[in-house]
Image (cartoon, rainbow, N blue to C red):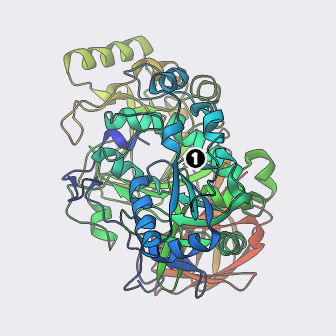
Amino acid sequence: MNSTLSQNPTAHAEIDDAGLRKTAQLLMPAKLTTEAVAGEEYNIYPVCKLGDNKIFNGYDALAGWVIKQKTVVIDGYAGILWDKVKTGLEQHIALKGFSINWVETTQYLKPEAEVDTLVKPFLGTADSVWGTKCTLNLHDLFQTEKLGAQQPNSEFEINIIIGTGASLANWQAPLIYIDMPKNELQFRMRAGAIKNLGSSEVDEPYLMYKRFYFVDWVLLNQHKKQLLDKITVLADGQWANNINWMFKTDFAEGLNKMSQSVIRVRPWFEPGAWGGQWIKEHIPGINKDVVNYAWSFELIVPENGLIFESDGNLLEASFDFLMFNNQQQVLGKHAERFGDEFPIRFDFLDTFDGGNLSIQCHPSLKYIQDVFGENITQDETYYILDCKEDANVYLGFQDNIDPDEFQAALIKSQNESTEVQIEDFVQVHQAKKHDLFLIPNGTIHSAGANNLVLEISATPYIFTFKMYDWLRLDLEGNPRPINIDHAFNNLNFECKGQKVKEEYISIPTVIEQTTDHTLVHLPTHPNHFYDIHRIEFTAETRVDTNDCCHIMMLVEGQKVLIETADGSRHVFAYAETFVIPAAAKWYKLTNLGKTPAKVIKAFLK
């Protein structure tokens, strides 16, 4: 998968009238006015239904609750528009005649120069796409003694401490936590509407993203985890002048419910330099007025959210909450190994009528741990969901590969903007629907034009070392970063010749067959910690989880019904990703389409 999406901003992106979002993507509605019929077509707003009176809308309702408490803590994620939250509450509280003592945490951050010094070791070099995962704690960025000294003032009727890190003041009061979807955070970042923690200035988007990814998000995820049992109210901060909120007890009940039945995250979509037209043509509800779509974040859980619904009101919360609260139910026998880090991702790479991805590779496990501070590395596979007849995949080296000659050609291309005859060095393989190409770390690869790739991979998703990018610019006319040195520290030059076809292109094997059911094994590489099955059936079939999480997608057919042991029933359409947690115990798949169904199942070995 290609590097950080923030380097490929949305084509035709415009800053909205309020100057808060730079994107062509639609803002999720706070309330569903019309709901897609589940399973009839791909749904961009999949919800977990909580029943009536569980999610509440508006600052007026939240202010009424705050008044009853008299003293509250309002903490939250990066990207929250705290001034708007304060205004939204203040106007409703003031209307009722109450005096308010506001304590704002931004006043108690350490001086900016001191914060910059603290985080600098984790940001790599100025020209690098990557940093290293931060090992600080959120309180390291604050003047904790001064913040702790700001306690409720009895001269006021209402006391509110507000802002990221508010809980660090240790008020003995109910906690409101405001969460923020990562896609909306990045749209605000690109518009210059928000800043990094402790920063007073807006920086270039790719630098802000790097700081968010390696520092801010790490600190705030850790902080969120520590607050899990202290939260009284959870709120969604993605709307500038509105808010949806719910009580933590109802939220936890929703998490518990999905951790034993079915999980589907909210997908989101981004254009890119090589992007195509398949997503635009096949997925309803997204903005079609963009040049292309390159990615769909189907299940890249560090940046996906879960949507809850009650009375039509929607509330999105990060996937992290589910793993913090229910990792054992989700991962079963693999929870001890991976903890609260969900290990598998699904995403689409769309090159239909688009271009080739860059020629690239990913870091070895030791390299990503030593250099970037990650726990697992970017081991990938390409499952061809759809393609044209001329589609291909670049994978592995030619048998006569000379590493020095290849490196020299790449460096010359970078320095002199000259074309590289890639096929002199890298093999090209025809792509067909349902093929699976194996891309363990260090493997040279690229998806060619006219593919819709379902990328089934380990979760890390930004560590792509591009060696050659076909001399093109990104959507804003800027060169895309090339990382030849990183690549050559990781390339596996033994992946060459006939070995590529024998070991890096999966050979399907039927391992179970009945009159209505065929189970196909699509073996992954020995270096992959996950494996892949395809379940093919005409009517219905039953599958045991065996205390293992299953990540699934309908890759052929119209729609399927999923029934789990707890009685839950969900219908999913073609190309929708869904997760069956280990605690579901078993599930039944029923084909609701008119043609045979094929469902991919990825699972941990």
Quadrant (top left/top right/bottom left/bottom right) for the N terminus: top left
587 left or right, relative to 73: right
325 left or right, relative to 495: right
What crowding class fits label 1: few (fewer than 14 Cα within 10 Å), some (14-19), or many (20 or more)? many
Residue 268 in sight in this render = yes
Number of numbered discs: 1
Give the residue displayed 27% in from the left and 55% down from the top: 23
Image quadrant assignment for residue 2: top left
Give the residue displayed 26% in from the left and 43% down from the top: 273
Q: Is residue 571 above or below residue 304?
A: below
Q: Position of residue 453 (x, y in %)?
A: 42, 54
Viewer-nearest residue: 128 or 107: 107
Q: Amino acid at mark 1?
A: Thr
Give the residue displayed 49% in from the left and 29% down from the top: 497
Q: Is residue 158 above or below residue 395?
A: below
Give the residue displayed 31% in from the left and 16% down from the top: 409
Q: Position of residue 238 (x, y in %)?
A: 42, 61
Q: Is residue 206 above or below residue 280?
A: above
Image quadrant assignment for residue 255: bottom right
Q: Residue furthest front?
A: 155
Secondary structure at numbered mark 1:
loop
Viewer-nearest residue: 317 or 84: 84
260 left or right, relative to 458: right
Residue 395 in sight in this render = no
Viewer-nearest residue: 418 or 16: 16
Q: Position of residue 511 (x, y in %)?
A: 70, 64
Residue pointed to by mark 1: 459
Viewer-nearest residue: 333 or 445: 333
545 left or right, relative to 2: right
Q: Position of residue 466 (x, y in %)?
A: 38, 30
